[in-house]
Image (cartoon, grey):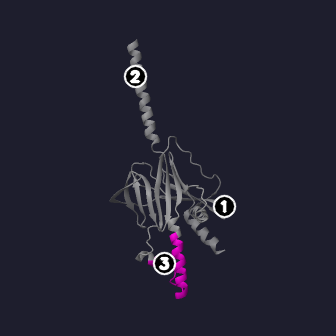
Amino acid sequence: MQKKLLIIGYLLITSLLFCIKAQNKELSNYHQITYDLSLFDKINLNSEQGKKALDSVTKNSSNKDAEIIKSKTENLMRILQSNKIPFLLTIGENASYFTVKEELTENMFKKLMQEGISDKIGSFYTELNTGKVINIRNYRGNTYFIEDKQNKKWTITNERKNILGYKCIKATDSDNTVVWYTEDIKSTSGPLEFSGLEGTILELNLNGMHFIATEIKKLEKVPKIKIPKKGKVISKEDFEKFIKESEKE
């Protein structure tokens, strides 16, 4: 009888340990990742690329105006390069949520940058199983749910590097978007609407915007992802048409 009880106890303990191990493995896929957004930080203003960028904003101006505009543009770009905006990616069970990270700052310019970028970019809710992306934007006092689907075709390169101790792989697309993703965080998510890789994007370079992960937290509990309940559902194409028409008014 005692031997039978010992066997039952052993089986119960083994089963419990297996459940705990499985649960910990499952929970390890839930993360919060902080990114810094830098604008134009990949552009050296003294390089040929930088000079072309500055020349492009003055091509229709007189020589006198061109120098003033170029000087002001260069100063503005340097300010933008030196002020980083934090974003937060929350990875849940079947979805991820990417948004500007609330941060108290006494830097008025940085505060205005945060508000402006938040309005311009919005937040992104991604269904990880389907690839459906909802860009949540506030425009003229109204909330819009802009629906799209992640269907990018990525080219995986042989380049590798480490970001915050995670091994990352470089991938590109036909629009010259460059990302570095890690297979060590299994969720197929990343900044903005970008996903669809066999892991999580930790760095993104896109049209002068540079997102890079600065902190990665493993979550002990499944995070609750909350998005606004009220808003107008609209397709990406219809929203872009709506913006163009609104700006004409």
Quadrant for the C terminus, please: bottom right
Disc on the earlier residue, 2 or 3: 2
**Between 191 and 166, the one nearer to me in the picture:** 166
> Looking at the magenta stretch, what is its main secondary structure?
helix
Residue 44 is at least partly visible in this image: yes
Within 10 Å of disc 2 (Cα), the crowding (few <14, some 14-19, many 20+) is few
Earlier along the polypeptide chain: callout 1 or callout 2? 2
Callout 1 environment at 10 Å: few (<14), some (14 to 19), or many (20+)? few
Q: Position of residue 155 (x, y in %)?
A: 37, 61
- Marks 2, 3: nearer the viewer: 3
Counting residues from the start of the chain, the first of labels 1 and 3 encountered is 3
Residue bearing the label numbered 2: 10
Specify the amino acid type for callout 1.
Asn
**Residue holding disc 3:** 54
Q: Secondary structure at mark 1?
A: strand
Q: Which residue is mark 1?
A: 142
Q: Position of residue 78 (x, y in %)?
A: 50, 70
- For the record, the magenta segment spans 51-78
The image quadrant of residue 113 is bottom right
Magenta stretch holds residue 76: yes
Q: Dot 2 lies on which element?
A: helix
Name the kind of residue labelled 2 in the image: Tyr
Does 144 sit left or right of 31 as displayed? right
Residue at 44% x, 32% y is: 19
Mark 1–mark 3 Cα distance, whole angstroms, equals 35 Å
Tally of numbered tags: 3
Residue 182 marker? none
* Residue at 44% over, 78% down: 51
